Structures are given as C-alpha cells and as structure tokens.
Amino acid sequence: KSIDEACPGDLKDDWEKTKKKHAAFIKSFKVAHVKASSYCFYDLVPESFLLEYFGHKCKIVEHILKTYEKPNNYDYLLELTKLTREIEQQPVNLNLKALTPLMYKAKTRSFREKLARVQNRICYNVFGTKTGRLTTKKGSFPILTLDRDYRNLLIPSNDYFLELDFNGAELRCLLGLNEMEQPHQDIHDWHSEEIYKSSGKQITRDEIKKKIFSWLYGGVEASLGIPAIETYYNKRQVLNKYWDGDKIVNPFGREIQADEFHALNFLIQSTTSDLFLRRAIAVNNLLKNRKSRITALIHDSMLIDLDREDKEIIPELVKTMESTELGKFKVNKKVGLDFGSLRSF
C-alpha cells in the first residue's frame, strides 16, 4: 500500500492538507523553471512546513509499524529498495548527438521533446506490479520502453557497458519449478535437440521459439502435440503445487489472487522477477566500493557501467548472476560502448 492508503482515519484530513501544500511548492518550482537537479527541496521551503510534513509522515509510519505485520520478504524488499534508490541517484549519461541522424522523423523529434520533460535519472517503483516486475515512476527516464533505435543514446560514465541477462528466463523458471536440471546450452537449441528431434519433426529455431512461447502462455491446457515436452514442463503439476484455487504463492512467498486461466502466467512471471532481482542485489553487493555500478535493470537483464579496472571480476559477476535458487541459469553476456551497440562475447 501507499502511505496514503495506509494513513489512519484520524490523520487523513491533516495529511491531505499537508500534501496539497507540498504539491503547491513543487508546482511553484516548475512554474519558476527551477531544475530539480539544481536545488535542495529543504532549502526552498519554510522550516515550519518541513516539521509539519514529516511530523505527519512519522505518525503514519508509527501507525503502520504497530498495525501491520512485518512481511516475510521484508529483507528482500528493503535491499531492492536500496538498490533502486542507488540507481536513481546516478544521472543517466546521454549522448544527444546520437539522435541527430534520425531527427527528420516526427517520432524522434517527439522523443527529444519528451527527454526535455523527464528527469535525467531512472526512478523505479518496486511495487508497480502484482508480479513484482519493476516499473518506472512518472517523470523517470523511460528505460523500460526505450525504442531500440534510440538505445545508442545511452552511454557509460566509465569505460563500457556490460549487459548480463538470463537465456530463456521464464522457460528456465518453469523447468526449475518442475525441479528439472537446467540445460547448459541455449534453451531453444536444447528444445530442438531434446524435444523436437524425439518427435521426428524438423523445425527452425525461430519457429520453435514462437511455438514454445505460444504454448507457455496459452493456458494450462494448451498443447503442442508433442508428449515429450510434458516430461520437462509439466504445467498442471506446477499449478497444483503453487495454486490453491484462489491465489498462487510462488517459491519466494509472493501471493497473487488469480483464477485458473491467469494463475500459471502470474506464477512464472512473479518467480522470474523475484529470482532475477535477487541476483541483481547479489551482483550489486559485489560492486560495492568499486567504480563500476549497475546503471539499469530491464526486465530480466542488468546493464552495468563497467570501469576497465574491474574487468577481472566479470567471471565472478557472471557466476553470481547464474547461481539462482532454481538452478544454474545460462547467462548471456554482451559488451559495448553504448547501449545500442552491445555485442555478445
């Protein structure tokens, strides 16, 4: 819940009045064209307002601590909040000249105008979705929806970008939920060798990929017509284990209300998200006291702004990323001098 939703009835009127004052101050700064990055909010408002605002906030928090039980995943949520706040404190390094060749397009000009209106920071909301996937806050740099044509806009502050992402994350999660061993190769190549060859069917990698994902999100009763696949991905067995007919509870304790049609999708997506973000926290801990840092978290991939002096820890970063609670996941590795020119290595 937001602090507004958790506010007790006897404090609601005072809190609403204080919030309106806060919003009025923010609006006045925007009207005066004061850049958020160039001032401290505390220096521009009366001390009496700060005492009032944080006094009410403290009372609400005291009420929450007395009224609500501590969540089982509190430590994880705390560490994730710290990580996303660290990312938020780092200005995004942009090469706006990269847009010049595309400025003849109306879409690009519109995007350039949008950049002038948003913060030069990535601000995540860790409670933006029921499955735990990160969203960005209003006014944030739009990293999660950034068009591929504009990715070269984003450049490192250190020497180069290192991107680590899971190979076939959601399919591997379903394998893990079935307690099956993780394949060490590309998951779609593995499908070709283990599942399709046994059925006697010849099919390309792209066709396999489309069919598998269509089957995965087609509901628990969806079929590929290949019995061998159920040996590895028993959707009904997993659903019976994690869904009680009303809600799913994933391996990390996340509860989501769901009917049968949505239950498996919510289970896979929430498990993938919780698993990846726990790996991101572990990777971030390895980067403590180093110049390198995590720049962004994009679904199931992390973008690291790597300093050349830290290149010797890349194998350790990869090992930490791949060592998940559901087995050893294959990790794809890419490097580049900007977000748009990443290449596998």
Image: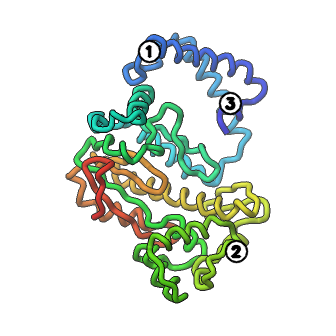
Q: Mark 1: which secondary structure?
A: helix
Q: Which mark is residue 112?
A: none
Horizontal side of 207 relative to 89 (left or right) equals: right
Horizontal side of 46 relative to 307 (left or right) equals: right
Q: Which mark is residue 236?
A: 2
Q: Position of residue 301 (x, y in %)?
A: 43, 56
- At 60% across and 20% down in the image, what residue appears? 53
Q: Position of residue 127 (x, y in %)?
A: 60, 44
What amino acid is at disc 1? Asp
According to the picture, the residue beneath numbered tag 1 turns out to be 43
Q: Position of residue 140 (x, y in %)?
A: 47, 34
Instruction: Give the mark nearest the N terminus, 2 or 3.
Output: 3
- Do the residues under discs 2 and 3 have CB atoms within 8 angstroms? no
Q: In whole angstroms, how far apart are the C-alphas of marks 2 and 3?
A: 40 Å
Horizontal side of 343 relative to 34 (left or right) equals: left
According to the picture, the residue beneath numbered tag 3 turns out to be 4
Q: Mark 3: which secondary structure?
A: helix
- At 63% across and 20% down in the image, what residue appears? 19
Instruction: Give the mark nearest the N terminus, 3 or 1.
Output: 3
- At 51% across and 40% down in the image, what residue appears? 136
| Relative height, residue 226 to residue 268 (above, below) | below
Work out whether residue 241 can be spotted.
no
Q: In whole angstroms, how far apart are the C-alphas of marks 2 and 1?
A: 59 Å
Horizontal side of 94 relative to 224 (left or right) equals: left
Tag nearer the camera, 3 or 1: 3
Q: In whole angstroms, how far apart are the C-alphas of marks 3 and 1?
A: 25 Å
Instruction: Give the mark nearest the N terminus, 2 or 1.
Output: 1
Which of the colour schemes (rainbow, by chain, secondary structure, one colour) is used?
rainbow
> Nearest the camera: 214 or 271?
214
Tag nearer the camera, 2 or 3: 2
Q: Residues within 10 Å of mark 3 (few under 14, many from 20)?
A: few
